[in-house]
Every structure is written in C-alpha cells, then in structure tokens.
Image: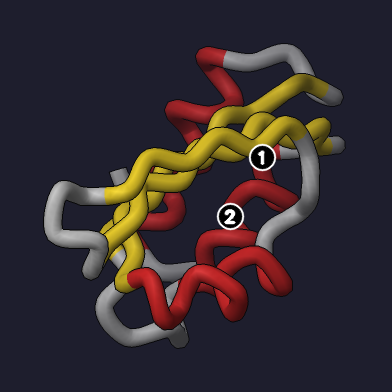
Amino acid sequence: MDQNFAQFKERLEEGHSWPSTYTFKFVVPNAKKGSLMTLIPMGEVSERASSSGKYVSVTIKSHMESADHVINAYKKISVLEGVITL
C-alpha cells in the first residue's frame, strides 16, 4: 500500500468507528460529474456549481464498512482527470 494511503488509513481508523458515515468532498469539472457519481458509493448528495458553471462541488455522505472501503473509493476516483479531492 502506498505510504500516503497507509497514513490516511491510520487517520481514518483513529477518527472513525466502523461501519460509519463518511463524507467525501470533490471539485470536479461539470462534464465529469456523471463519471464521478458512478464511481463513488451513493448516499446523501449535495452539489454547488461554480459561478462560471465549469465546475461543481460535490459532497457525498456514504455509509462505509471500513477504512479500506473509503480508500478503495478514492483509488477508483483517482483515475478521473481534473477531479480535486478535498
């Protein structure tokens, strides 16, 4: 496992009791929003478009079983160009 993901997993394990609700936050080009939504576990979704309409801020609260499930979701999303993870 990549060192960054190993450290992230440690923080997730320390800060959450699994299973738990986890909040994902992204800024994504509007044209890629559909692709993002197919890769992330679904849950409560809120969106906010940028003033130019080129980007959208997406917050998704999803029920996750473990820190590993969260990390796997981020790994899937990492293949999308232009997505900023917050």
The residue type indicated by label 2 comes to Ile
Query: Circle 1 sits in a helix, a strand or a loop, which is it?
Result: helix
User: Residue 84 got which mark?
Assistant: none
Can I make out residue 49 in this image?
A: yes
The circle on residue 67 is 1
Residue 7 in view of the camera: no
Viewer-side residue, 21 vs 50: 50
Q: On the rendered image, what quadrant is the C terminus found in?
A: top left
Callout 1 amino acid: Ala
Drawn side of residue 10 relative to residue 56, left or right: right
**Which residue is denoted by mark 2 in the rendering?**
71
Could you say whether the residue bearing mark 2 is in a helix, strand or loop? Answer: helix
Residue at screen point 73% across, 31% down: 44
Asked if disc 2 and disc 1 are in contact, CB closer than 8 Å, the reply is yes
- Relative to the observer, which residue lies in front, 24 or 49? 49
Residue at the location (67% across, 60% down)?
40
| Circle 1 crowding by C-alpha within 10 Å: few under 14, some 14–19, many from 20 | many
Residue neighbourhood size for the residue with mark 2, other residues' Cα within 10 Å, grouped as few (<14), some (14–19), many (≥20): some
Q: Does 4 appear above or below 14?
A: below
User: Residue at (64%, 47%) from the top-left corner?
Assistant: 70
Residue 10 shown left or right of residue 4 in the figure: right
User: x, y percentage for residue 35?
Assistant: 59, 79
Could you say where residue 26 lies in the image, as x and y percent from the top left? 38, 51
**Camera-side residue of 32 and 66:** 32
11 horizontally vs 57: left or right = right
